Image: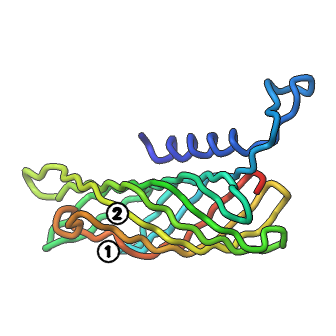
């Protein structure tokens, strides 16, 4: 699935879970008996990788359980060209990951607040060496990504966030198979819509 399409689907799902509902007399299909406290939206990351910086796009969505704790899903994919060099040979790289998201927000009713989260789940990278007769190589692995975000309450429903995260990858020899490691830091931007 294309990264932009996937992030759009994730964003639409988060919107469906978190958008306030109105009764059918006011122009929508249904009104749930209780409002589900949830939020979600698209995001982008500048990932710092061994051969340079790459752009990742995707999104997250979470249901607020209570007392600032949230549980949801998220996913990101490589959205820019990234061509690492391994043993003197250039490689074309693809990379996507997703998983379960757990987060905790502090002081959510203030103009600025802090959100700490961790996403863990499956990831896949693929690589093709720019050499005659090379085949595409795939690696599946586990990725854990803790992050810390500074959030701005723009409206009661809309929040913008700027954050830092770190990717930990395990379960495969990424440098040997794909020509690069995928561990490393990232600067992220996220737009969240919904009630928390």
Q: Which residue is mark 1?
A: 51
Left or right, residue 180 beside residue 107: left
Split into 4 quadrants, where in the image is the N terminus? top left
Looking at the rendered structure, which numbered label has been put on residue 82? 2
Q: Residues within 10 Å of mark 2 (few under 14, many from 20)?
A: some
Split into 4 quadrants, where in the image is the C terminus? bottom right
Residue in the image at 45% along x and 54% along y:
98
Residue in the image at 13% along x and 73% along y:
87
Q: Residues within 10 Å of mark 1 (few under 14, many from 20)?
A: few
Pointer 1 or 2: first along the chain: 1
Looking at the rendered structure, which numbered label has been put on residue 195? none
**Mark 1 and 2 residues: CB-CB less than 8 Å, in contact?**
yes
Q: Callout 1: helix, strand or loop? A: loop
Residue in the image at 87% along x and 33% along y:
22
Q: Callout 2: helix, strand or loop? A: loop
Rendering coords of residue 86 (x, y %): 18, 71
Number of on-image labels: 2
Rendering coords of residue 85 (x, y %): 22, 70
Alpha carbon separation for disc pair 1 and 2:
8 Å
């Amino acid at each position: 699935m294309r990264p932009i399409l996937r992030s759009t689907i994730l964003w639409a799902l988060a919107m469906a879970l978190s958008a306030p509902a109105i009764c059918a007399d006011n122009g929508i299909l249904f009104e749930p008996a209780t409002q589900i406290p949830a939020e979600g939206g698209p995001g982008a990351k500048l990932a710092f990788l061994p051969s340079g910086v790459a752009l990742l796009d995707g999104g997250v969505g979470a249901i607020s359980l209570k007392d600032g704790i949230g549980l949801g899903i998220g996913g990101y994919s490589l959205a820019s060209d990234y061509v690492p060099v391994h043993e003197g040979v250039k490689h074309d790289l693809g990379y996507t990951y997703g998983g379960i998201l757990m987060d905790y927000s502090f002081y959510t009713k203030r103009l600025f607040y802090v959100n700490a989260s961790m996403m863990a789940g499956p990831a896949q990278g693929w690589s093709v060496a720019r050499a005659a007769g090379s085949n595409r190589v795939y690696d599946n692995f586990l990725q854990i990504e803790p992050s810390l975000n500074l959030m701005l309450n723009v409206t009661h429903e809309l929040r913008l966030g700027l954050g830092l995260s770190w990717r930990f990858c395990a379960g495969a020899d990424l440098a040997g198979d794909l020509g690069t490691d995928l561990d490393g830091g990232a600067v992220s931007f996220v737009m969240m819509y919904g009630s928390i």
